[in-house]
Image: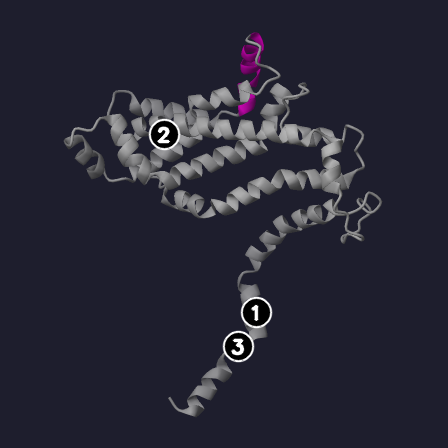
Amino acid sequence: MSTLELTERQSRQPRPGRRLLYLLAEHAPAVAIALCFLLPLTIGVLTAFMTQQQAGTGSLWPSPWEFGNFRKVFSAMPFGRDLLNTMVYAGLSTVGVVVSSVPVAYALARLRWRGREGVFLVVLAAMMIPAQVTSLPLYVMYAHIGWVGTLKPLIVPSFFGDAFSIFLLRQFFLTIPDEFTEAARVDGAGELRILWRVLIPMAKPAIAAVGLFAFLYAWNDFYNPLLYTGNSDTGQTLAVALSQLAKNGHQNAYELQMAASLMFLLPVLVLFFLAQKVFVEGIALTGVKG
């Protein structure tokens, strides 16, 4: 290639400034959607570092930066105790969902038994029932056995399966070739051993995605903790405690509310970024076969 041709080709290429404009124009819808999510979060983060006199005045930049708001949260509310309750609820319920959903999904995907399709339809129907429909009978039942005011109504039901998790895992198990399980049966392995030694190692991305879904749901859950622990002095989760922060003499302390919300959000963000690769892989590999 001659020097003249190389010069002409370079002249045809857009300059760095124009290239940036082309990229922005090409991805304008995605940028607009991202801004819709990032702007409220940015305003909340900046408000968390403002003084009480500045917060709520419409100012967008802290002046001066008040880093003591995060320390004041611990005196304004029992943040440590509520954080521990939230971690117990989210952690144990995640374990319960994974432990109880994997065997059911395996039975619906890999075993042949009468009534299997009917049971799967029941699982699909359970996904469509709003939680508010079953709230009253469940509350009456838990009140009779003395569980209201504790974390038990939030944790124990997760050990009896979750319809969405069962569906997601079943769809993943269906994508695994039958040759793996058939070879294990030929070698004399039972169903539990096939599940534990063959399918679970292959389904780690899907199981990780189900676990992350369950953890995020429990961490952000507001309705159920409010229903069962809203009147408890020691059993509240952070989602309920944050909603009551404004009622406890801090209705105008926007900087404390934003600081507490930021500390509530931070563990979830860290967990998601650490597990992002496995989470995306699990969702991508989970098909809709069957």
First to last magenta residue range: 131-144
Q: Earlier in the sequence, mark 2 or mark 1?
A: 1
Mark 3: secondary structure: loop
Indicate the quadrant containing the C terminus: top left, top right, bottom left or bottom right.
top left
Amino acid under label 3? Pro
In front of the other: label 2 or label 1?
A: 2
Amino acid under label 1? Leu
Mark 1: secondary structure: helix
Residue denoted by label 1: 20
In this view, 217 is above or below 271: above
Is residue 142 inside the magenta stretch? yes
Q: Nearer the viewer, residue 58 or 136?
A: 58
Amino acid under label 2? Val
Q: How is the image coloured?
A: one colour
Residue denoted by label 2: 102
Q: Position of residue 99 (x, y in %)?
A: 40, 27
In this view, 14 is above or below 145: below
Q: Earlier in the sequence, mark 1 or mark 3?
A: 3
Find residue 14 and name its label: 3
Q: Nearer the viewer, residue 74 or 139?
A: 74
Q: Residues within 10 Å of mark 1 (few under 14, many from 20)?
A: few
The furthest residue to the left: 186
